[in-house]
Image (tube, helix red, strand yellow):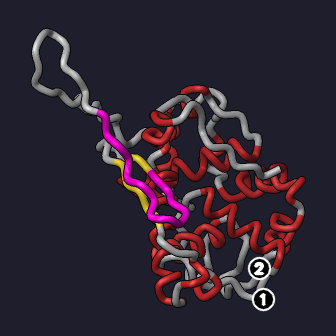
Amino acid sequence: MADTNGKTPTVPYVPFKTFVATLDSFATFLPDRIDASIWASYSGGMRSQLLSAYKFLGLIGDDGKPKPELKKLADEKEHRGALLRDILKRSYVDLLKLDLSKATPSSFDEELRKYGVEGDTRRKATAFFLTAAKAAGIPLSPLLTARGGMATTRPKVNRPKPRVEGTGNQAEIPKVTPPQSTGGPGKTITLESGITVTLSTSADLFSMTKADRQWVLSLLDMLDQYEEEHPQEVRDEENEDEEVEVA
Protein backbone atom coordinates (compact mmCIF):
# COMPACT_ATOMS: atom_id res chain seq x y z
CA MET A 1 0.00 0.00 0.00
CA ALA A 2 1.80 3.16 -1.21
CA ASP A 3 1.37 6.55 0.44
CA THR A 4 0.85 9.86 -1.38
CA ASN A 5 4.61 10.13 -1.94
CA GLY A 6 4.68 6.82 -3.76
CA LYS A 7 6.52 5.09 -0.94
CA THR A 8 5.38 1.77 0.47
CA PRO A 9 5.34 1.68 4.31
CA THR A 10 7.62 -0.90 5.86
CA VAL A 11 5.91 -4.11 7.02
CA PRO A 12 5.24 -4.05 10.78
CA TYR A 13 8.15 -5.16 12.93
CA VAL A 14 7.01 -3.74 16.25
CA PRO A 15 6.37 -6.32 19.02
CA PHE A 16 2.81 -7.58 18.51
CA LYS A 17 2.15 -7.34 22.25
CA THR A 18 2.92 -3.62 22.14
CA PHE A 19 0.69 -3.17 19.09
CA VAL A 20 -2.23 -4.82 20.89
CA ALA A 21 -1.63 -2.67 23.97
CA THR A 22 -2.00 0.48 21.88
CA LEU A 23 -5.20 -0.87 20.33
CA ASP A 24 -6.64 -1.46 23.79
CA SER A 25 -5.82 2.11 24.79
CA PHE A 26 -7.76 3.42 21.79
CA ALA A 27 -10.89 1.68 23.07
CA THR A 28 -10.87 4.22 25.90
CA PHE A 29 -9.84 7.26 23.88
CA LEU A 30 -9.15 7.57 20.15
CA PRO A 31 -7.50 10.90 19.24
CA ASP A 32 -8.30 12.68 15.99
CA ARG A 33 -4.74 12.11 14.80
CA ILE A 34 -2.28 9.29 15.47
CA ASP A 35 1.25 10.63 15.80
CA ALA A 36 4.34 10.05 17.92
CA SER A 37 3.24 12.51 20.61
CA ILE A 38 0.45 10.23 21.87
CA TRP A 39 2.94 7.58 23.05
CA ALA A 40 5.07 9.69 25.38
CA SER A 41 6.09 6.69 27.51
CA TYR A 42 7.58 4.80 24.54
CA SER A 43 11.06 5.25 23.12
CA GLY A 44 11.51 7.14 19.85
CA GLY A 45 12.28 3.94 17.96
CA MET A 46 9.16 2.23 19.31
CA ARG A 47 6.96 5.17 18.32
CA SER A 48 8.35 5.07 14.78
CA GLN A 49 7.70 1.32 14.52
CA LEU A 50 4.12 1.75 15.76
CA LEU A 51 3.34 4.53 13.26
CA SER A 52 4.81 2.47 10.43
CA ALA A 53 2.69 -0.53 11.46
CA TYR A 54 -0.53 1.49 11.58
CA LYS A 55 0.17 2.96 8.14
CA PHE A 56 1.07 -0.38 6.53
CA LEU A 57 -2.08 -2.01 7.91
CA GLY A 58 -4.19 0.86 6.55
CA LEU A 59 -5.46 1.88 9.99
CA ILE A 60 -4.43 5.53 9.62
CA GLY A 61 -4.02 7.84 6.63
CA ASP A 62 -0.91 9.70 5.55
CA ASP A 63 -2.13 12.60 7.70
CA GLY A 64 -2.41 10.32 10.74
CA LYS A 65 -6.19 10.43 10.87
CA PRO A 66 -7.74 7.13 12.07
CA LYS A 67 -9.60 5.01 9.53
CA PRO A 68 -12.95 3.40 10.44
CA GLU A 69 -11.21 0.01 10.68
CA LEU A 70 -9.08 1.27 13.56
CA LYS A 71 -12.08 2.27 15.65
CA LYS A 72 -13.71 -1.11 15.00
CA LEU A 73 -10.51 -2.97 15.87
CA ALA A 74 -10.19 -1.02 19.11
CA ASP A 75 -13.85 -1.11 20.21
CA GLU A 76 -15.02 -4.54 19.05
CA LYS A 77 -12.57 -6.68 20.98
CA GLU A 78 -14.85 -9.72 20.77
CA HIS A 79 -14.64 -9.54 16.96
CA ARG A 80 -11.01 -8.46 16.79
CA GLY A 81 -9.75 -11.78 15.46
CA ALA A 82 -12.00 -11.68 12.39
CA LEU A 83 -11.31 -7.98 11.81
CA LEU A 84 -7.58 -8.52 12.07
CA ARG A 85 -7.77 -11.43 9.63
CA ASP A 86 -9.37 -9.19 6.98
CA ILE A 87 -6.77 -6.48 7.59
CA LEU A 88 -3.86 -8.92 7.23
CA LYS A 89 -5.29 -10.36 4.00
CA ARG A 90 -5.65 -6.86 2.57
CA SER A 91 -2.21 -5.69 3.69
CA TYR A 92 -0.08 -8.80 2.98
CA VAL A 93 -1.59 -9.69 -0.40
CA ASP A 94 1.55 -11.23 -1.92
CA LEU A 95 2.65 -13.04 1.24
CA LEU A 96 -0.78 -14.61 1.66
CA LYS A 97 -0.62 -16.06 -1.82
CA LEU A 98 1.40 -18.73 -0.05
CA ASP A 99 -0.50 -21.61 1.48
CA LEU A 100 0.67 -20.78 5.00
CA SER A 101 -0.82 -24.01 6.32
CA LYS A 102 1.86 -25.91 4.37
CA ALA A 103 4.63 -23.33 4.05
CA THR A 104 8.18 -23.96 5.21
CA PRO A 105 10.29 -21.35 7.06
CA SER A 106 12.40 -21.04 3.89
CA SER A 107 9.49 -20.39 1.52
CA PHE A 108 7.95 -17.93 3.99
CA ASP A 109 11.27 -16.10 4.35
CA GLU A 110 11.66 -15.84 0.57
CA GLU A 111 8.26 -14.17 0.23
CA LEU A 112 8.85 -11.80 3.14
CA ARG A 113 12.13 -10.64 1.56
CA LYS A 114 10.08 -9.24 -1.31
CA TYR A 115 8.75 -6.60 1.10
CA GLY A 116 12.23 -5.09 1.27
CA VAL A 117 13.16 -6.08 4.81
CA GLU A 118 16.49 -7.67 5.65
CA GLY A 119 18.51 -8.86 8.61
CA ASP A 120 17.17 -8.17 12.08
CA THR A 121 14.21 -6.16 10.75
CA ARG A 122 13.06 -9.18 8.73
CA ARG A 123 13.28 -11.41 11.79
CA LYS A 124 11.15 -8.93 13.77
CA ALA A 125 8.68 -8.65 10.87
CA THR A 126 8.40 -12.45 10.83
CA ALA A 127 7.61 -12.51 14.55
CA PHE A 128 4.93 -9.82 14.15
CA PHE A 129 3.18 -11.45 11.22
CA LEU A 130 3.15 -15.00 12.58
CA THR A 131 1.90 -13.85 16.00
CA ALA A 132 -0.76 -11.68 14.36
CA ALA A 133 -1.79 -14.49 11.98
CA LYS A 134 -2.13 -16.91 14.88
CA ALA A 135 -4.26 -14.40 16.79
CA ALA A 136 -6.39 -13.84 13.66
CA GLY A 137 -7.02 -17.55 13.21
CA ILE A 138 -5.09 -17.88 9.94
CA PRO A 139 -3.93 -21.53 9.56
CA LEU A 140 -0.16 -21.82 9.89
CA SER A 141 2.18 -24.66 9.07
CA PRO A 142 3.53 -26.49 12.14
CA LEU A 143 6.97 -25.77 10.67
CA LEU A 144 6.30 -22.06 11.17
CA THR A 145 4.82 -22.35 14.65
CA ALA A 146 7.29 -24.92 16.03
CA ARG A 147 10.10 -23.81 18.31
CA GLY A 148 12.45 -21.61 16.38
CA GLY A 149 10.04 -21.27 13.45
CA MET A 150 9.39 -17.62 14.30
CA ALA A 151 13.10 -16.81 14.24
CA THR A 152 14.14 -18.40 10.98
CA THR A 153 16.88 -15.89 10.24
CA ARG A 154 18.71 -16.43 13.52
CA PRO A 155 20.03 -19.93 14.30
CA LYS A 156 19.72 -21.25 17.80
CA VAL A 157 22.82 -20.71 19.87
CA ASN A 158 24.05 -23.79 21.71
CA ARG A 159 25.36 -22.39 24.94
CA PRO A 160 28.01 -24.47 26.74
CA LYS A 161 27.08 -25.49 30.24
CA PRO A 162 29.25 -24.02 32.99
CA ARG A 163 31.89 -26.35 34.36
CA VAL A 164 33.51 -26.27 37.77
CA GLU A 165 36.72 -28.02 38.68
CA GLY A 166 36.15 -30.84 41.11
CA THR A 167 36.92 -34.44 41.91
CA GLY A 168 35.41 -37.42 40.09
CA ASN A 169 33.74 -37.49 36.70
CA GLN A 170 30.86 -35.17 37.55
CA ALA A 171 31.31 -31.46 38.02
CA GLU A 172 29.11 -29.62 40.47
CA ILE A 173 27.20 -26.65 39.06
CA PRO A 174 27.11 -23.77 41.53
CA LYS A 175 23.70 -22.33 42.36
CA VAL A 176 23.14 -18.75 41.28
CA THR A 177 20.92 -16.56 43.42
CA PRO A 178 18.93 -14.14 41.29
CA PRO A 179 19.11 -10.47 42.17
CA GLN A 180 16.61 -9.44 44.82
CA SER A 181 14.14 -6.63 44.32
CA THR A 182 14.80 -3.51 46.35
CA GLY A 183 11.20 -3.13 47.31
CA GLY A 184 9.28 -2.18 44.19
CA PRO A 185 7.91 -4.31 41.33
CA GLY A 186 10.49 -6.04 39.15
CA LYS A 187 10.87 -7.75 35.78
CA THR A 188 13.44 -10.38 34.86
CA ILE A 189 14.41 -11.66 31.39
CA THR A 190 17.04 -14.11 30.20
CA LEU A 191 19.25 -13.00 27.30
CA GLU A 192 20.19 -15.38 24.49
CA SER A 193 23.68 -15.63 26.06
CA GLY A 194 22.14 -17.01 29.26
CA ILE A 195 22.63 -13.81 31.27
CA THR A 196 19.71 -12.81 33.51
CA VAL A 197 18.72 -9.14 33.60
CA THR A 198 16.42 -7.82 36.33
CA LEU A 199 14.86 -4.35 36.46
CA SER A 200 13.32 -3.27 39.76
CA THR A 201 12.46 -0.01 41.45
CA SER A 202 12.80 1.06 45.06
CA ALA A 203 9.67 3.19 44.97
CA ASP A 204 6.28 3.48 43.33
CA LEU A 205 6.31 5.03 39.84
CA PHE A 206 3.90 7.71 41.02
CA SER A 207 6.47 9.05 43.47
CA MET A 208 8.98 9.70 40.64
CA THR A 209 9.40 12.86 38.63
CA LYS A 210 7.89 12.83 35.16
CA ALA A 211 11.32 12.56 33.51
CA ASP A 212 12.40 9.66 35.77
CA ARG A 213 9.11 7.84 35.25
CA GLN A 214 9.33 8.10 31.46
CA TRP A 215 12.93 6.86 31.51
CA VAL A 216 12.01 3.81 33.64
CA LEU A 217 9.05 3.05 31.37
CA SER A 218 11.35 3.22 28.34
CA LEU A 219 13.55 0.57 29.99
CA LEU A 220 10.48 -1.64 30.50
CA ASP A 221 9.62 -1.15 26.82
CA MET A 222 13.10 -2.36 25.85
CA LEU A 223 12.74 -5.48 28.04
CA ASP A 224 9.32 -6.23 26.51
CA GLN A 225 10.70 -5.65 23.01
CA TYR A 226 13.62 -8.01 23.65
CA GLU A 227 11.25 -10.77 24.81
CA GLU A 228 9.02 -10.28 21.77
CA GLU A 229 11.97 -10.24 19.38
CA HIS A 230 13.56 -13.37 20.88
CA PRO A 231 10.61 -15.78 21.21
CA GLN A 232 12.88 -18.79 20.81
CA GLU A 233 14.89 -17.89 23.88
CA VAL A 234 11.80 -17.02 25.89
CA ARG A 235 10.21 -20.38 25.09
CA ASP A 236 13.34 -22.14 26.31
CA GLU A 237 12.50 -20.79 29.77
CA GLU A 238 8.71 -21.29 29.60
CA ASN A 239 6.48 -24.25 28.76
CA GLU A 240 4.49 -22.43 26.14
CA ASP A 241 4.21 -19.12 24.31
CA GLU A 242 2.54 -16.22 26.00
CA GLU A 243 -0.88 -15.91 24.38
CA VAL A 244 -2.29 -12.51 23.36
CA GLU A 245 -6.09 -12.40 23.32
CA VAL A 246 -7.56 -10.55 20.39
CA ALA A 247 -11.00 -12.08 20.22
Residue 114 in view here: no
Residue 40 x/y as whole percent: 58, 84
Mark 2 touches mark 1? (CB < 8 Å) = yes
Which residue sits at x=15%, y=9%? 169
Q: Circle 2: is it few (<14), some (14-19), or many (20+) Cα within 10 Å?
A: many
Residue 72, picture quadrant:
bottom right
Location of the N terminus (image quadrant): bottom right
Looking at the image, the residue that sits furthest to the top is 169
Residue 238 higher or lower than 52, as above or below: above
Q: CA distance from mark 2 to mark 1?
A: 7 Å
Residue on which disc 2 sits:
66
- Segment colored magenta: 175-188
Query: Which residue is nearer to you in this view: 190 or 147?
Result: 190
Q: Is residue 118 left or right of residue 67?
A: left
Which residue sits at x=12%, y=10%? 168
Residue on which disc 1 sits:
32
Residue 45 x/y as whole percent: 46, 74
Residue 195 x/y as whole percent: 31, 47
Residue 151 x/y as whole percent: 45, 41
Q: Is residue 231 left or right of residue 169?
A: right
Magenta-colored stretch includes residue 186: yes
Q: Secondary structure at mark 1?
A: loop
Which residue sits at x=51%, y=45%? 111
Looking at the image, the residue that sits furthest to the front is 183
Query: Which residue is nearer to you in this view: 174 or 158?
Result: 174
Residue 115 in view here: yes
Amino acid type, mark 2 = Pro
Q: Secondary structure at mark 2?
A: loop
Q: Circle 1: is it few (<14), some (14-19), or many (20+) Cα within 10 Å?
A: few
Which residue sits at x=50%, y=65%? 183
